[in-house]
Structure formats: structure tokens, C-alpha cells
């Protein structure tokens, strides 16, 4: 799994866990819907930490909670 796929998976899990749509998460976080769609659809390969922090703030998660999953913990180093 790539970092991009892990971020996408986590965002989708968060929406599912909180029973909200991606659009609602954008509204709650003050994020641009097109930016979020680009992240989830793989257009944006490297989402900014500020965007992820905004998502976390909107749902009362810490960054540690966002990234504390088995698939983030097992990511291998990617070639840049």
C-alpha cells in the first residue's frame, strides 16, 4: 500500500465511522471540496499535513489518531 492509498483509506474510514459524507467532512473542516476529491481520487499524490490537521480538528482527532492504523504503521519507504 502506498501513502496515498493509506490516506485515502483513512479519510473514507473516518467518513464511515462518523456517518458523514466527504462533502460534509469538507464543510466541517473548512477544506476545499475539490482538494479533498483530488486527494481521495488519487489526483493529489501528497496531501498536505495542514489539510489532514484540519480534517482531524473537525472530528476531534489528533494527528496521532489519524495515523495510528496498522496500514500506516506497516508502510514501506517509497521511492521519490
Image (cartoon, rainbow, N blue to C red):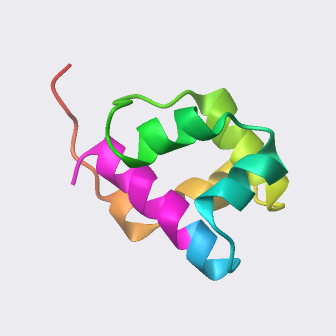
* Image vertical order of residue 68 relative to residue 5, above or below: below
* Image vertical order of residue 28 relative to residue 14, above or below: above
Which residue is more in the foreground, 73 or 53? 53
Specify start and end residues of the magenta stretch as a single range. 1-13
Q: Residue at x 67, y 34 (%)?
A: 32
Q: Is residue 42 left or right of residue 28?
A: left
Q: Which secondary structure dominates the residues rendered in magenta?
A: helix
Which residue is more in the foreground, 13 or 78? 13
Q: Position of residue 23 (x, y in %)?
A: 66, 55
Q: Position of residue 28 (x, y in %)?
A: 82, 52
Q: Is residue 20 left or right of residue 9?
A: right
Q: Quadrant of the C terminus?
A: top left
* Magenta stretch: includes residue 62: no
Q: Residue at x 75, y 41 (%)?
A: 54
Q: Quadrant of the N terminus?
A: bottom left
* Image vertical order of residue 54 relative to residue 21, above or below: above
Which residue is more in the foreground, 34 or 30? 34
Q: Position of residue 77 (x, y in %)?
A: 22, 36
Which residue is more in the foreground, 41 or 50? 41
Amino acid at each position: 500500500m502506498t501513502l496515498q492509498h493509506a490516506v485515502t483509506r483513512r479519510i473514507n474510514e473516518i467518513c464511515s465511522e462518523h456517518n458523514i459524507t466527504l462533502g460534509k467532512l469538507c464543510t466541517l473542516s473548512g477544506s476545499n471540496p475539490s482538494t479533498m476529491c483530488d486527494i481521495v481520487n488519487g489526483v493529489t499524490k501528497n496531501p498536505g499535513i495542514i489539510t489532514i490537521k484540519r480534517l482531524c480538528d473537525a472530528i476531534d482527532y489528533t494527528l496521532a489518531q489519524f495515523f495510528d492504523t496498522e496500514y500506516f504503521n506497516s508502510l514501506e519507504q517509497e521511492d521519490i
